[in-house]
Image (cartoon, rainbow, N blue to C red):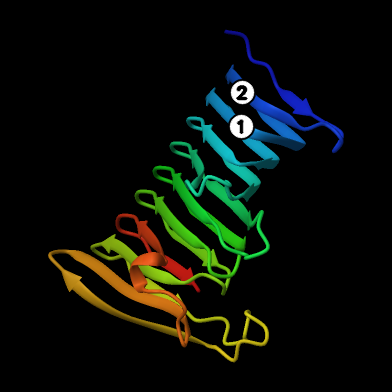
Amino acid sequence: MASMNLDMKLSAQYEFSNVAFRTNNGDIHVDRIVADDIALIFLNAAVSGLYTARQFGLRTTNAPVDVIVTAADKESGRPTEITMGTTNAPLRGQVVLQSGTRYMTGNYRVVATTTNAPLDMNYTHIPVNAKLAAVMTTTEAPIYARVNSAFEGSFQLITTNAGGTTVQNRSTHNIDEGSGRHREVAWNSADVRGQRVTQGIANWSPTLRPIEMMGSIVCTTTNQDIAFWV
């Protein structure tokens, strides 16, 4: 199939129900698109742009990904799902999670994967009391993961051999204004059968919900470092 590059500029006034793009060997850039469900399936195509959806899926191969995804929670209570993946190329994603209710909650699931290249994910906004379950995976390359200080839940960082893990607690301010709560982040690291494993938990204290109702972060790579800001 012939190569075709796609550069889309859609006015903000257009909002779609379902959007699907498929192409081989041609790059895609979208200035902005808003839809309930966005599906992008490519071969050997770089992907970039700004996407807003309640369901977002992106899959390409052998080409970089650099996207900003804004997602709102579903009224049904089922998780809003964001998946993005490539192979043999860097993946960089910025995720903005929004709540459609005045209670500032939400249920979100994010999966980001690549191979043999760095993975850089930044969750710049998370609603207070939301549940975020995120999995980030690469091989033979570092992972950089940053979550907004509203995140509450467990985190697990796993690498092998010479790789290391670092955790930085970058916020102690009270994101839930007026509540009087303070930030608590605790973790420990151990070498387990050739793996470097760091496990921890981040929450606001006093907590408003049990740990099983909170979120989770899992990062895995091989032979390289994982840096996590929480």
**109 vs 172: above or below:** above
Q: Is residue 12 left or right of residue 100?
A: right
Q: Nearer the viewer, residue 61 or 103?
A: 103
In percent of the image, x 58 and y 50: which residue is there?
Answer: 73
Mark earlier in primary sequence (2, 1): 2
The image position of residue 105, as x and y in percent, is: 57, 62
* In this picture, residue 117 sits left or right of residue 200: right
Q: Secondary structure at mark 2?
A: strand
Q: Residue at x 26, y 69 (%)?
A: 197
Residue in front for this viewpoint, 129 or 66: 129
For disc 1, the neighbor class at 10 Å (few under 14, some 14 to 19, many from 20) is many
For the residue marked with disc 1, what is the amino acid? Ile
Between the C-alphas of marks 2 and 1, the distance is 6 Å
Q: Amino acid at mark 2?
A: Ala
Residue highlighted by disc 1: 38
Residue 122 vs 26, above or below: the answer is: below
The answer to whether mark 2 and mark 1 are in CB contact below 8 A is yes
Disc ID at residue 20? 2
Residue 227 locus on image (x, y percent): 45, 68
Above or below residue 183? Residue 209 is: above
How packed mark 2 is, by other alpha carbons closer than 10 Å (few <14, some 14-19, many 20 or more), is few
Q: Residue at x 50, y 74 (%)?
A: 230
Point out residue 23 in the picture as x, y percentages from the top left corner.
Answer: 59, 18
